[in-house]
Image: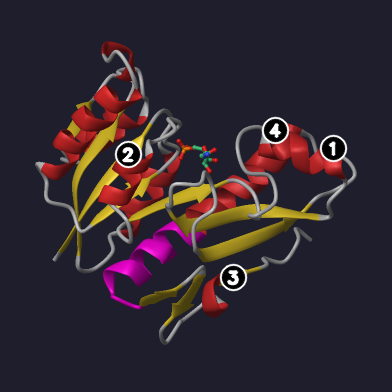
Amino acid sequence: MKKLVILISGRGSNMEAIVRAAIPGAKIAAVIANKPTAAGLAFARAHGIEAEVVDHTAYADRDAFDNALAIAIDRHEPDLVVLAGFMRVLGDAFVRRYEGRMINIHPSLLPSFPGLHTHRKAIESGVRLHGATVHFVTPTLDCGPIIAQAAVPVGADDTEASLAAKVLVQEHVIYPQAVRWFVEGRLRVEGNRVTVIDADLPSDGWMVPLPDA
Ligand code: GAR
């Protein structure tokens, strides 16, 4: 059984999608939030998952917070740390500690639009395709080896909110899928490239859903 710790900052809908996927061989050991107000904590508790808060405002600096977070995570001895809408930048030492066993979902087709306000940037830049990326976490923000991506069309009438909603639907598909591949030991990383061994659907880590009819 592979143990997962999921980190959230707010709503936690990606965490919820992973919990609901009930991935064989995966046990969600804990959900940890950096904010006591994170709405996802209630869902985790209601599903019998240990839910904790490591409040970043209680720590003097990033290193102190990262250390406290690492202690909270390591108590569960996870095989995989899953960042699911976790909105704190993590220091290099923290990231190296979990190298190869920490993944993130980002709401853009990386390497386009790292950082915040990805949907606004997509609209302003005029791209026709936008989407979401699941990747291994490395010290450079939103830059690690890509495991899965899903694309959505950007319509002329799309707003930041409508685009975010379309992307989120795909996030909930590719994140549980990527976690499952990790749990099944199917991911091989060479440099910045990830190969999915015997990938089932969707194709080797990418999908382009059909636009709404
Ligand atoms: C998701 O759209 C996720 O991709 C994004 O925050 C949202 C969290 O939603 N993450 C980032 O922007 C990380 N840089 P959720 O709390 O409902 O999963």
Ligand 1 within 8 angstroms of badge 1 C-beta: no
Q: Are marks 1 and 2 in contact (CB under 8 Å)?
A: no
Q: Which mark is residue 124?
A: 1
Mark closer to the chain start, 4 or 3: 4
Label 4 sits on residue: 161
Q: What is the C-alpha distance between the residues marked 2 and 3?
A: 24 Å
SS label for mark 4 = helix
Q: As drawn, is 49 to the left or to the right of 182?
A: left
Mark closer to the chain start, 1 or 2: 2
Q: Position of residue 142 (x, y in %)?
A: 54, 47
Q: What is the C-alpha distance between the residues marked 4 and 2?
A: 24 Å
Residue type at mark 1: give it.
Glu
Label 3 sits on residue: 206
Q: What is the C-alpha distance between the residues marked 1 and 2?
A: 30 Å
Q: Nearer the viewer, residue 45 or 38?
A: 38
Q: Are marks 4 and 2 in contact (CB under 8 Å)?
A: no
What residue range appears in magenta? 174-186
SS label for mark 1 = helix
Query: Is 146 part of what is drawn in magenta?
Result: no
Q: Nearer the viewer, residue 187 or 37?
A: 187
Magenta span main SS: helix
Residue type at mark 2: give it.
Leu
Label 2 sits on residue: 7
SS label for mark 2 = strand
Q: Position of residue 169 (x, y in %)?
A: 57, 50
Q: Position of residue 188 (x, y in %)?
A: 39, 77
- Specify the farthest residue to the left: 75
Q: As drawn, is 80 to the left or to the right of 197?
A: left
Q: In this rendering, is residue 180 above or below 195?
A: above
Neighbours of disc 1 within 10 Å: few (<14), some (14-19), many (20+)? few
Query: Is 177 part of what is drawn in magenta?
Result: yes
Neighbours of disc 2 within 10 Å: few (<14), some (14-19), many (20+)? many
